[in-house]
Image: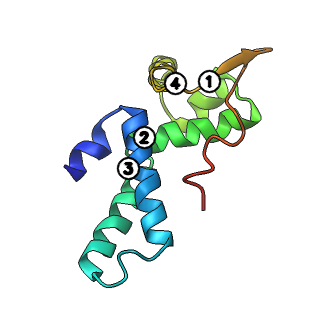
């Protein structure tokens, strides 16, 4: 299951898993089980990494909180324009309010509040 979460592109599902794991780790719910804590920490790290679709989407959202052009996202994420538009479609399907003003894509500033440190 963990491998599926890392490669799937369903942003809403992965966001829920990520937020739950971050909350459980911050509240030390795994403190009595070292294996579970190590697994949860590893999964959070993998989800937030650049090798996962979700990690790149998080980075993209971070850029869009300040307002980002397609070219800025392409350069920062090291991917094609097509990939950026695919990620935008994933976010739209997840109900994320992405807006375009003056050539810059934006999302609400508090969107990542649940998963930021």
Q: Looking at the image, do the residues carrying marks 4 and 2 touch, with CB atoms under 8 Å apart? A: no
Q: Earlier in the sequence, mark 3 or mark 4?
A: 3
> Residue 70 got which mark?
none
Please, is residue 32 above or below residue 111 in the view? below
- Other-residue count near label 4 (Cα within 10 Å), few / some / many at <14 / 14–19 / ≥20: few
Which quadrant holds residue 93?
top left
Q: CA distance from mark 3 to mark 2?
A: 11 Å
**Whole-percent x, y for residue 11 in the image:** 42, 34
**Whole-percent x, y for residue 55 in the image:** 46, 45
Q: Earlier in the sequence, mark 4 or mark 2?
A: 2
Please indicate whether residue 46 sits to the left or right of residue 102 in the image: left
Q: Earlier in the sequence, mark 3 or mark 1?
A: 3
User: Where does label 3 land, which residue?
Assistant: 17
User: Where does label 2 land, which residue?
Assistant: 54
Please state the total of marks drawn on the protein image.
4
Q: Earlier in the sequence, mark 3 or mark 2?
A: 3
Q: CA distance from mark 4 to mark 2?
A: 15 Å
Q: Looking at the image, do the residues carrying marks 3 and 2 touch, with CB atoms under 8 Å apart? A: no
Please, is residue 60 above or below residue 22 in the view? above
Secondary structure, mark 3, is: helix
Please indicate whether residue 98 sits to the left or right of residue 47 in the image: right
**Whole-percent x, y for residue 92 in the image:** 51, 20
> Residue 97 got which mark?
1
Q: Locate the C terminus and report the quarter of the image it occupies.
A: bottom right
Q: Nearer the viewer, residue 74 or 19?
A: 19
- Other-residue count near label 3 (Cα within 10 Å), few / some / many at <14 / 14–19 / ≥20: some
User: Where does label 4 land, which residue?
Assistant: 95
**Whole-percent x, y for residue 69 in the image:** 69, 23
Q: CA distance from mark 1 to mark 4?
A: 6 Å
């Amino acid at each position: 299951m963990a491998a599926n979460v890392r490669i799937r592109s369903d942003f809403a599902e992965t966001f829920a898993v990520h937020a739950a794991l971050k909350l459980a780790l911050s509240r030390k719910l795994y403190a009595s089980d070292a294996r579970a804590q190590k697994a949860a920490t590893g999964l959070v790290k993998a989800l937030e990494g650049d090798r996962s679709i979700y990690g790149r989407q998080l980075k993209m959202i971070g850029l869009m909180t300040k307002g980002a052009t397609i070219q800025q996202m392409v350069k920062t994420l090291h991917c094609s324009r097509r990939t950026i538009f695919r990620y935008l479609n994933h976010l739209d399907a997840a109900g994320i309010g992405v807006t375009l003003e003056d050539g810059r894509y934006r999302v609400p500033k508090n969107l990542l509040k649940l998963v930021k440190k």
